[in-house]
Image (cartoon, grey):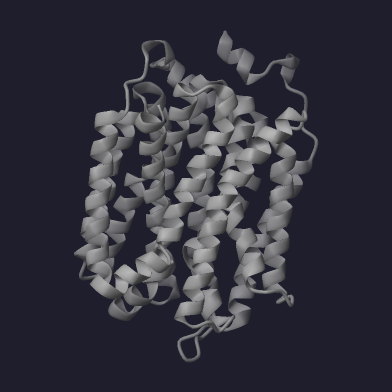
Amino acid sequence: MILQVFLPFAAAYYLSFLFRTINATVAGSLTAEFGLDAGDLGLLTSVYYLTFAAAQIPIGILLDRYGPGLIQSTVMVAAALGAAIFAGSDNFWLLLGGRALIGLGVAASLTAGLKALVLWFPSERVPLLNGLTIMLGGLGALTATLPAEFLLVSMGWRTLFELLAIVTAVCALIIYLVVPKVPAAKSSVTGGSTAHGLKMVYADPRFWRLAPLSATCIGTAWALQGLWAAPWLSDVEGLDRSGLLWHLLIMAIALSLGGLLWGIAVGRARRRGVGPRPLLALVATMFIAAQLALILRLPLPSYVPWIILAAVGAGTVLSYAILAEYFPKELAGRANAALNVFHIGGAFVVQYMTGLVVQFWVPSGGHYPEIAYQTAFALNVALQVAAGTWFALPSAPTRRGRSPMRECGK
């Protein structure tokens, strides 16, 4: 099962993270060649999240109906095609179309992997395996730093994306060939129960307590690491190219280790009778504190807040562990996809809107002023504080003591 299930899906998630975070490395080359401003750059990189989010609900339904192997291998073909179009683009709109296809093509990478773990591994091992999946996926973010820079210098960004297109197509083929079919006993029901299952997820008030906090924190972490960390480090911290890439490398390591750390933390907390909700609240508090340290320019080594921000990007381990307590495994694909809509949608909004806010200021010598980034980051923090307050409010008791778990069993 490790060779047939865990590693193939972890490889797909690795590629997803690589595509997501490589923008910070290639942004300079794209800006120079196509004359992009901050708004263009924000739209180009964030359209990945837009198509990714739009595909989540259909993909969640298809995962529960047809199984993760078939769906993952099919949609990854779009990512390979998108990378090929991106590599051959000669104008902004082709770049945008290629990037949108990449987002669509990797839209199943995490949810398919999570669904596969639920289907083929014991439930007590799933949180740790989720953490390991996030950790290995985080290596994609690591690859997008110094290794990608080496390839960028040696072969150019176009050849780099041609190579990514080939690797993505090979990964799709491997998943199609080696992942076992879903056992009939574990297959999910179809038809009217599909819509009913999705309605159950969105009708659960506990989901709506979780989604805003998870989306504002994790979405912001992805948006900052995927794009805006690099301009901040260059324009505000005044780092050269080498210093910037070392920061991105350390952040990628923090993201990767964060997935493992949160997975272990969930398991140990459960053995002590503590659920994942308090852990998510603690991580969100750390995240807000790290952003405030950046905004207020506290006298800390620049690595410290950015390491915390990057590690929070792996906080999906905590969010999905909370969902696993709310819904049965038959709804795992739809429940995870429903929450992922908020994660990815949040990342799209933050990444794009940050660019719109920053460009209100006029750059000097090719660098935007410190206040531009501080203002954009402060708006994000305000949303996180509001979401955290909503998350912390006491929940109303469920009607007649019923839970979605019981309703699903009817």
Locate residue 212, reporting x and y percent: 63, 45
337 vs 98: above or below: above
Q: Residue 105's quadrant in the figure? A: top left
Left or right: where does residue 396 sit relative to residue 304? right
Q: Outermost residue toward the right?
A: 394
Pick the front one: 372 or 319: 319
What residue is drawn where x is 61% and y is 39%?
Answer: 263
For the C terminus, the quadrant is: top right
Left or right: where does residue 347 sit relative to residue 27? right
352 vs 270: above or below: below
For the N terminus, the quadrant is: top left
Can residue 359 be seen by looking at this rendering?
no
Locate residue 248, reporting x and y percent: 50, 67
37 vs 5: above or below: below
Q: Outermost residue toward the bottom?
A: 365
Q: Outermost residue toward the front?
A: 3
Pick the front one: 226 or 373: 226
Can residue 98 be seen by looking at this rendering?
yes
Locate residue 312, reporting x and y percent: 61, 53
Pick the front one: 55 or 225: 225
Left or right: where does residue 242 sit relative to residue 278? left
Q: Residue 68's quadrant in the figure? A: top left
What residue is drawn where x is 37% and y is 12%?
Answer: 184
- Count of numbered labels shown in the rendering: 0
Locate residue 223, reporting x and y percent: 51, 60
What residue is drawn where x is 36% and y is 45%?
Answer: 106
